[in-house]
Amino acid sequence: MSFTKPRELPVAVDVMGGDHAPEAIVAGALIAAEQGIPLVLVGDEAVVRPLLGKRRDIPLVHASEQVEMGDKPTETLRRKPSSSMRKTIGLVKDEKACAAVSCGNSGALVVTAHMDLKTLTGLERPAIATVLPRADGGQLVLLDAGANVDCRPEMLATFATLGSALAEALGVKTPKVGLLSIGAEDGKGNAQVRAALPLLRALPLNVVGNVEPSAALAGECDVLVCDGFMGNVLIKSAEGAVETVMQLMRQEIRRNPSARFGAFLLSGALRRFRKRVAWDAHGGGMLLGVNGVVVVGHGRANPVAVAAAIRLAWVAHDEALIGRVVRAL
Amino acid sequence: MSFTKPRELPVAVDVMGGDHAPEAIVAGALIAAEQGIPLVLVGDEAVVRPLLGKRRDIPLVHASEQVEMGDKPTETLRRKPSSSMRKTIGLVKDEKACAAVSCGNSGALVVTAHMDLKTLTGLERPAIATVLPRADGGQLVLLDAGANVDCRPEMLATFATLGSALAEALGVKTPKVGLLSIGAEDGKGNAQVRAALPLLRALPLNVVGNVEPSAALAGECDVLVCDGFMGNVLIKSAEGAVETVMQLMRQEIRRNPSARFGAFLLSGALRRFRKRVAWDAHGGGMLLGVNGVVVVGHGRANPVAVAAAIRLAWVAHDEALIGRVVRAL
């Protein structure tokens, strides 16, 4: 599998951000580099250079500071003006990179990208979109996944437009757009949802109405719109439930020798299955609505997840996602 | 297993409410009756009597009307004053039953119980509590699971008190109470959460702070407090994720003969495991904060789930739950 194209701008990677940075980030970058994706890494030269091994040809931009997970997002720009995160975004701003990837403090990443890249014309706030696996084998674009914890109904309407453009870029024709609610009928939901649904219906999109999370994961829509608090709750509830099921299943299997042999026979199927449902195999979220491709990787990302995040950035760039979003707006 | 005690009041069951009513409800009631739980059924005599078979000894209160799933909750009291749901609640109000169970329109059930049983002194609104299985084998009391879609922060504080009392009744000593948020640190979350956390901390409860849904399902708290919209989203996201995992696993197993044999060897473990995680095996939600025990069964309840809901009502009554809640308030 090779993604190389002539004279393409590289993907900029903040190698200092993430729970396992810089080791896991550099290791993930090396995987992506082997797949032919052009890269530029950003981080502390003294720490990062030795991790590159024989790939010392990959360009490295030095950054003396780094944003920590506990840093307040709104203060990072002022306090750490030359952080690796900000320099990564800066490479996109200066058209020296086609996309930016960071697994660091996601709040700080949203603020930095918002400030330095600016939102697309006509857009108040960017949103983080995440792709989740559906029971029918399809993909669900969920947004906002955490960039805006408090949203006005008008913001949910712009998220619908952004999400529909992303689903189209992923190959879905006239994506079905749902509004996250508890009950499918119009009028169900809280005050925010009841105010937002008419605004979504007024858009030139294929809006199917209110959709419950279980129905969305079953395949009832391609795009699910909600505020960032709700979206984050949905993702972490789904992750928690899957983890609970796996844990309880492991206990059941441990109790019983014939079940253990059964699990052994199942292991190939389980491995392929894990690849399909692994919530981190999808590379993390995409910040939609700013002038540039920005991928918000998981803080806990391991090298495989980092490589997936870089691939997502590269493909999104390639799919001219920003152009689609601009046209949709 | 027998639950009978001398001179106990029966559990009142609305046999007309639920997607599979009255057949599935009556079938579930017969299972509970065989386990020795005294019952009084409420429904259309002409329809229900023939379903009782040789258990014609179970008392039946006739109701000529029934609340439909599509009925507007706030209008049901006026439009259907003698519905089976209202008569079921009425038996608790008139001290002819120790608890009420309905798998019908849950919004209507909340409104009816609120109006006819009244809230406990000092309480503005009741909440629905649901018990979810945790990865560590424990139980998570989640509330509100859907009674109040829009909540002020003060309401979340009262839910914390209600939930802690229920967890104690379930056998947990000084239950750990968490506030649903996205990030564990104080100050994380949306405006509602940031306003509610100090109110929870001021209560004489074991409040552990903000808890993410995945952490709650892993066992970080015994009680998770949120508004009814969020709680319902959490439950349906968890259900949807588990269903997605099961569906994708079935596909993997079908593809591969040795995996099929493995699944056969695993089937005993899977069956026991399903019993532990089946979200409907827990009998549904408990309406907390009204003068009486009211169980909100699943609309889709099958006979086994109905019997579990009746058992939950019986046990909650037996545990003197209301007394605990009143003392806690």
Image: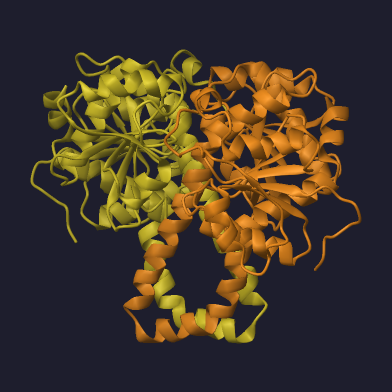
Chain colours: A yellow, B orange
| Residue found at the far right of this picture | B6
Most distant residue in the front direction: B46
Q: Residue at x 34, y 21 (%)?
A: A196
Image coordinates of residue B76 in percent, x first then y, are 51, 28
Residue depicted at x 66% and y 52%: B309
- Quadrant of the image occupied by residue B231: top right
Q: Observer-nearest residue: A269 or B73?
A: B73
The residue located at (17%, 35%) in the rendering is A321
For residue A267, above or below residue B132? below
In the depicted structure, whether residue A87 falls above or below residue B3? above
Residue A52 showing in the rendered view: no
Horizontal side of A294 relative to B20 (left or right) equals left
Left or right relative to B299: residue A54 = left
Rendered location of residue A173, percent (x, y): 13, 43
On the image, the x and y values in percent for residue B209 come to: 70, 30
Q: How many marks?
A: 0
With B111 as the anchor, is A209 left or right in this view? left
Which residue is rendered at x = 37% and y = 32% of the image?
A62
Residue in front for this viewpoint, B180 or A205: A205
Q: Residue furthest left?
A: A6
Quarter where residue A325 is shown: top left
**Residue A167 horizontal/vertical position (percent):** 21, 40
- In the displayed structure, does residue B255 sit left or right of residue A227? left
- The quarter of the rendered structure image containing the N terminus of chain A is bottom left
